[in-house]
Image (cartoon, rainbow, N blue to C red):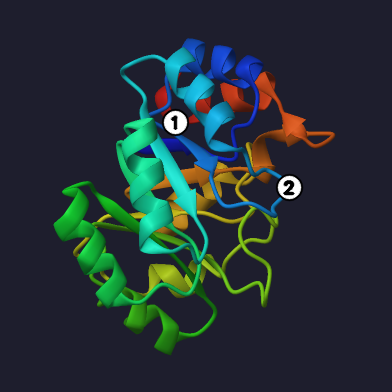
Amino acid sequence: MKIKFCGIRRLEDVTAINMLQPDYMGMILSAGFRRSVPLSTAKQLIQQKSSAIQAVGVFVNETMKTILHAAEQLHLDVIQLHGAETPEQVQQLQQITKLPIWKALRIGTAEELETAANFPADCLVLEGNTGTAVGGTGICADWNLFAKRQWQRPFFLAGGLTPENLKQAIAVVQPFGVDFSSGIEENGSKSPEKMKQIITIIRGA
């Protein structure tokens, strides 16, 4: 199972990540969010990380020009869209960048789930419908709703995952990967201990 630690902002977070070796390290590259980082900081974080860990740039309703500039400057491995981006925008980015394009979608109903299943992204990041809030809310999705559908494509389960509820979430949903942000924080900062607990639960000691 793939593991993504998202909302990384500090070099000490990267030090912990390098020790634990999740599959993906996510950074919020759109301004205005608590975990946002400027490109200059993101560049330092990426330079510090292990080459085995893929860098995911997360964008919220950004222009094509902004996304392409960041992807080129940072040599991103994955682009994740977390706003109201359309299928057409996803397909355009796929064609231009040749990078995997992930799309985060908020799911609260069976209809939203069906729409997500047909969204033309390389991978989906599915979380609960939290109204106007965008990611990192700590609010869990309706796992039973997700479990009712047979998935033919990879998706990450996100939203409110913690070391305490991870085993249950995996058992119910059986996702391709799991995505953590608020669930690996303590007092607003990433917790190496919580990250270690996640790795231990999924991969063993």
Report the Cα–Cα distance between label 2 and label 1.
28 Å
46 up-or-down from 5: above or below? above
Question: Percent position (x, y) of residue 130?
Answer: 66, 72
Between 131 and 64, the one nearer to me in the picture? 64
Q: Which residue is mark 1?
A: 202
Q: For the residue marked with disc 1, what is the amino acid?
A: Ile
Name the amino acid type tagged 2.
Answer: Arg
User: Looking at the picture, how far across and down is residue 194, in whole percent?
Assistant: 66, 27
Q: Which residue is pictured at 32% across the width and 32% down the height?
A: 75
Near-viewer residue (69 or 32): 69
Assign a secondary structure to mark 2.
loop
Rendered location of residue 6, percent (x, y): 54, 40
Dividing the picture into quadrants, the one containing residue 133 is bottom right
Question: Which one is nearer the viewer's eye here, 105 or 68?
Answer: 68
Residue 161's x, y, as percent? 60, 48
> What residue did someone put label 2 on?
34
